[in-house]
Image: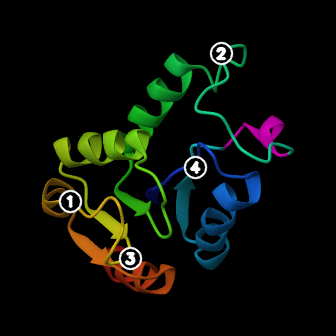
Amino acid sequence: MLKVYLAGPIAGKSWEEATGWRNWFIEKFDNIEFLSPLRGKEYLEKESSIQGSYETMVLSSSRGLTTRDRWDCTRADVVIINFLGADKVSIGTVMEIAWADLKRKPIILIMDRDNIHNHPMIRESVGYVVGSLEEASYVLEHLAW
């Protein structure tokens, strides 16, 4: 089964903002295994602004989240990055792009034209740049075909 990692800004987002678009993909495709950096972190559901790390929580500590996110990026078959509406640079997500690119994983980037992440090195590291979740799902569907 195809594995797809769903990357995008989390710090500063509410649980719904961070998981809503991920759940959209999970519900749309039943023949794909999706990996979310938020799995097993339901203890963050009540957070109105998720922090960068929670050092007392093993999966959310700096080392814990870096270890699993790097592993997920490198073992996934495809990585989807969602930068829509980002108002500050997501350093963690940029790291995930680098890890996936190093392993030559196809990366589908969802980004507005004037996005803060619109940088030459980001654009050159991803295979597909689209402007909506729907366009990204179209690319994914045809990669997985």
Residue stretch rendered in magenta on the structure? 39-45
The amino acid on which the numbered mark 4 sits, given as a three-letter code, is Ser
**Where is 60 relative to 74, above or below?**
above
| SS for callout 1 | loop
Residue at 28% x, 74% y is 129
**Where is 16 relative to 63, above or below?**
below
Q: Quadrant of residue 106?
A: bottom left
Dot 1: few (<14), some (14–19), or many (≥20) neighbours within 10 Å?
Answer: few
Q: Give the labeled residue for mark 4.
A: 36
Of the two numbered discs 4 and 2 on the same chain, state the one appearing first in sequence: 4
Would residue 73 be found to the left or right of residue 29 on screen?
A: left
Mark in front: 4 vs 2: 2
Of the two numbered discs 3 and 2 on the same chain, state the one appearing first in sequence: 2
Q: Which mark is residue 112?
A: 3
Tag 3–tag 2 contact (CB < 8 Å): no
State the quadrant of the C terminus.
Answer: bottom left
| SS for callout 3 | loop
